[in-house]
Image (cartoon, helix red, strand yellow):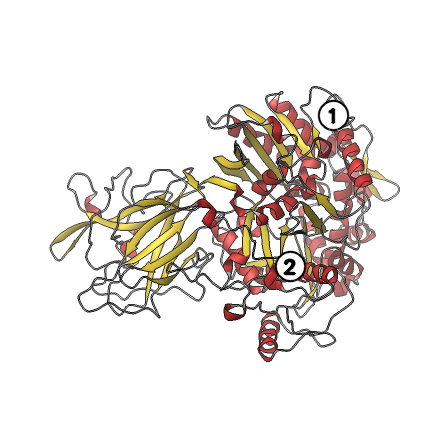
Amino acid sequence: MQMASAAGAPQPNLLDRAQAARSAEERGEGRDREDQQSESRRPDFPSPRCGEEARRPPPTSPVSAPSVGGARGGGVRLSGGEDYAAGAGRFPIRAKGDGTSGAMATPSPAKSMGDPGITPLSPTHIQQKDTDQNAQTGASFIVVVAIDFGTTSSGYAYAFVKEPECIHTMRRWEGGDPGVSNQKTPTTILLTPDRKFHSFGYAARDFYHDLDPTESKQWLYLEKFKMKLHTTANLSIDTELHAANGKKVKALDIFAYALAFFKEQALKELSDQAGADFDNADVRWVITVPAIWKMPAKQFMREAAYKASLVCRENPEQLIIALEPEAASIYCRKLRLHQMVDLGAKTSMNGYSPTDNVGSVMTQAKEHVRRNRQSRTFLVENVIGELWSELTEGDRYVVVDCGGGTVDLTVHQIRMPEGHLKELYKASGGPYGSIGIDYEFEKLLCKIFGQDFIDQFKIKRPAAWVDLMIAFESRKRAAAPDRTNPLNINLPFSFIDYYKKFRGHSVEHALRKSNVDFVKWSSQGMLRMSPDAMNALFKPTIDHIIQHLRELFDKPEVTDIKFLFLVGGFAESPLLQRAVQDMLQGRSRIIIPHDVGLTILKGAVLFGLDPGVIKVRRSPLTYGVGVLNRFVEGKHPPEKLLVKDGTRWCTDVFDTFISADQSVALGETVKRSYTPAKPSQQVIVIHIYCSEKERVAFISDPGVRKCGTLRLDLSGTEAPAPGVRREIQTLMQFGDTEIRAMALDVSTSRSVKASIDFLSQ
């Protein structure tokens, strides 16, 4: 792979670097090899070779390759006047379905946009394709690299296609914290005062820590920013993040910087192994996201990958979005008995008894992993593991992915003999990750020292605030159900000093005056928390998780669960493990992989090697479009009536593509046909609506919202002869981790560029 070098020169901004790299690549320039491998190395943003230069050219079949993500650059709307149908014929060819009114009708959203709805030429039709055709194994790639982009920590791992049983984890990171494993690096990023990328991970955090307090206020430091994609209601490519100093920065730039950093680190490691520059075209990339993320968040990650030049738009299949609990489930299939802790075992396993203290069991397991980790290479079974051999056709299990920001729950059923997986209930969960404990700690500090002081301290001494949270993190990990001795948390000197200047009295005085009896002041400059005080910080977050588990196990689809796999970094918490044990009361065996923090990462590599392993998924939402149907008196609300050229139509009828919690097989497609309103029309833009309800009658029903657009680009295709109706057949796939679209001009059998955009709302 050829890359432009910027070594030794002032760092241009992200877009300038991308353009410079593309120009250099066109001139055939190479890049200087940098022997130094460091976390703080600045990522380049070269454009991967696309089109004719790409190792994997786009498919040449009549139907275009599935388009993932959206068409950027603004949606094209049809002109007004008589073109009533947004992307459909002026007059319906076939009336489709019958809409019924199930609630008080609200004003027509379609009419308010000058768009009363569209009428498909063909009725709902679900076509079953050969599932293996869609599940490419990546045989044309040399290696699969997975990036686990976590809320609190991130990392990468890879495996060569010819050695799929060997998963290599990333080089060990520089830096680290006492008592905290650094298998991955913190999801922290640092930009210079002029907003250029400086460093990522431990390097970013440590450099920021060492800055002079006055100087640090000029730098942009961001951490735990991944959750913004889940919590932002109207996510767009212009969504902004707040750095520690309060300044705003575009979220897309931050995510692109992070992905470019991992790309550079991974390619450097692969190049060192190969003895020559490793070509990015030989890599299939996998990025993990929570299963409960909506489509806009998934597309945002893909857009960031495009901007980071991880892959190019012309070759979208080089990148796979993996759902975190699915990745964990795939890896857990390979577990052997010595690679896990079985909290529900009736007898001793690997020297651990189920009656042992739950915290000591995990401590022994971590030590077992440390002793046996002679290298960063993990061997996985090329068949199902020993635990899986206990499962039979139809057996069910639950994966609970407890991360830093979210908790994801997935229910899978085993399908023999290949061991393929079927999702039984749509992924669920919520923002119940371990950072909730950090928020509780911050609330405790506000109660003791005052909200006004904490807010000011975070702005005036941002680096010291980071130090304080690092100190809390190491003590948080020491919390356990049976702990009796207190936990001491170091307060930075600047916290003590700034508080005295701010309030006029000491930190010790504040603790004495507060009503918080379970936190004392230590003469060594530490907050001394009783075990009960620490456990109380965990309680709200763990209660949310347990409540969600109870609700899940009450579902009819979730009965006779054989195993519950507890994965993710938060799964190491003895308090959480005990709470899950108490809730299940032996109904299911609780399995915790030894290297629980790397489970998702290793599973994502396996998913990249075999994307077709999950054969059936459940749709999280109901998706459809607004269409016109023949108006039926007494059935359709009068306010939905539209009369056009003497014909009575009912507007806003919801044409369902797929319903919430509906099972969809991998490769299954929904087919619709549309026709342009004018022969000269170049673009068809169709609004997509969604709802959490399974049954929807109208796009104006409560809970229905516009969530995206389907864009069919007709430019470059021949217009039919006069008087010949032009039919564009569209296929949409809902059985993968992303919604995909393909289109075909029926009259010419030529492919049409089709894309679904969830970010231009």
The C terminus lies in quadrant: bottom left
Locate residue 390, reporting x and y percent: 61, 26
Mark found first going from the N terminus, 1 or 2: 2
Number of numbered discs overlaid on the protein picture: 2
Say left or right for 461 vs 649. right
SS for callout 1: loop
The three-letter code of the residue at mark 2 reads Ala
Q: Is residue 309 above or below residue 347?
A: below
SS for callout 2: helix
- Residue tagged by mark 2? 258
In this view, the residue in front, 442 or 435, is 435
The residue under the point 77% across, 42% down is: 474
Label number found at residue 349 = 1
Locate residue 338, reporting x and y percent: 73, 32
Q: Is residue 498 above or below residue 30?
A: above
Q: Quadrant of residue 38?
A: bottom right
Locate residue 421, reporting x and y percent: 52, 37
Q: Is residue 170 above or below residue 280?
A: above
Say left or right for 582 vs 485. left
The three-letter code of the residue at mark 1 reads Met
Badge 2: how crowded within 10 Å, few (<14), some, or many (20+)? many
Locate residue 675, reporting x and y percent: 26, 59
Give the farthest residue toward the right.
524
Whether residue 704 is visible: yes
In this view, the residue in front, 325 or 611, is 611
